[in-house]
Amino acid sequence: MRGFHYYSIAPSGGGSTTVAPVHDGYVLQKAVATSPIGGEFLTDCLMKSLESKGIAMKPRYSFRRKEIRPGEFQTVDLDFPNTTESYKLYSQRVIASDIKECVCRAPDTPYDESAYSNIPTTSYELPDGQTLEIGADRFKIPDVLFNPSLAQSIPGMESFAEIAPSVRGLPQMVIESINKCDVDIRRELFSSILLAGGTASMQQLKERLEKDLLEESPQAARVKVLASGNATERRFSVWIGGSILASLGSFQQMWFSKSEYEEHGASYIQRKCP
């Protein structure tokens, strides 16, 4: 498709964020930017923040709710002594991830502790019936995508300080990546920035990214951030794109055969499918 350029951003590749410029159907590998901050990192930030406030998230397997009278329930703890710590952590992350998706939203401006100290809270009911009142955290956690150093102020995340100086915010990643591309296509890349992935479904993320890019990008750039209006499509857009690619008649040309692997090794795929 001649003249069609767009930018693909996957904020929640789970463990990372990837910004990849695509030109005429090909990823410009030398301009790809990555960050260790993805959906799981934000979930961990939220978990640590809640734990520091004395909020314990009981995994779903560790209790059952018993109705003692109509509309009134009692939580009964269950004992599974052989449960591994990794499974317990996974179960708690599932709950924290749901909290993040339900109540968090990217702030309109960079997060400021004093400005959000008296922000109205939002309620969230945990699986065990406990109700949380979440205030500033619902804005602070998403802003870590834009200002990674903010994570250091979250109790339990102090170890992030070691790499924080080298981690860029999402707007900086986009601008840096575009600036590594040929000057002739930069304007078109700025005008077609595509959000994809689970974290892309976060409220106000599209609007905040567009606002920050307008402030930080070259004056001549016409910044436009694109995202599906359907949250499910945003979440699974990378998979949907892969399934479409696999259904194309030309996909066979991209196959990496066993004989090619044995002859050239794993690195050959970078040359065959740039």
Image: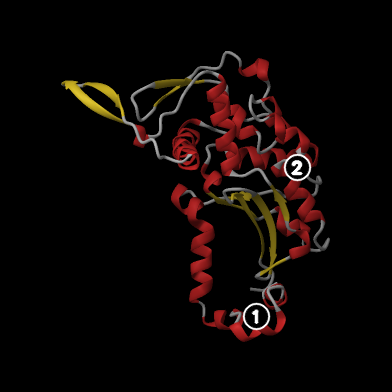
Q: Report crowding for label 2: few under 14, some 14 to 19, many 20 or more residues within 10 A (C-alpha).
A: many
Residue 105, above or below 69: below
**Residue at 81% over, 46% down:** 218
Q: Residue at x 72, y 76 (%)?
A: 271
Cβ atoms under marks 2 and 1 closer than 8 Å: no
Q: Is residue 67 visible?
A: yes
Point out residue 4 in the picture as x, y percentages from the top left corner: 66, 67
Q: Secondary structure at mark 2?
A: loop
Q: Is residue 271 above or below residue 211?
A: below
Image-based side of 162 in relation to 227, left or right: right
Q: Residue type at mark 2: give it.
A: Arg
The residue located at (63%, 37%) in the rendering is 208
- Position of the C terminus, as image quadrant, is bottom right
Left or right of 260? Residue 184 is right
User: Where in the figure is residue 144, as x and y percent of width and height?
Assistant: 66, 34
Tell which tag, 2 or 1, sits nearer the viewer.
1
Three-letter amino acid code at the position of disc 1: Tyr
Helix, strand, or loop for circle 1?
Answer: helix
Q: Position of residue 45 (x, y in %)?
A: 59, 32
Front residue of this view, candidates 132 and 75: 75
Q: Which residue is mark 1?
A: 261
Question: Residue furthest toward the front?
Answer: 82
Task: State the image coordinates of residue 150 (x, y, percent, origin top left).
Answer: 70, 29
Residue sitting at the far left: 70
The answer to whether residue 147 of the structure is visible from this angle is no
Q: Which residue is mark 2?
A: 168
**Residue at the (71%, 36%) spot, across then down:** 148
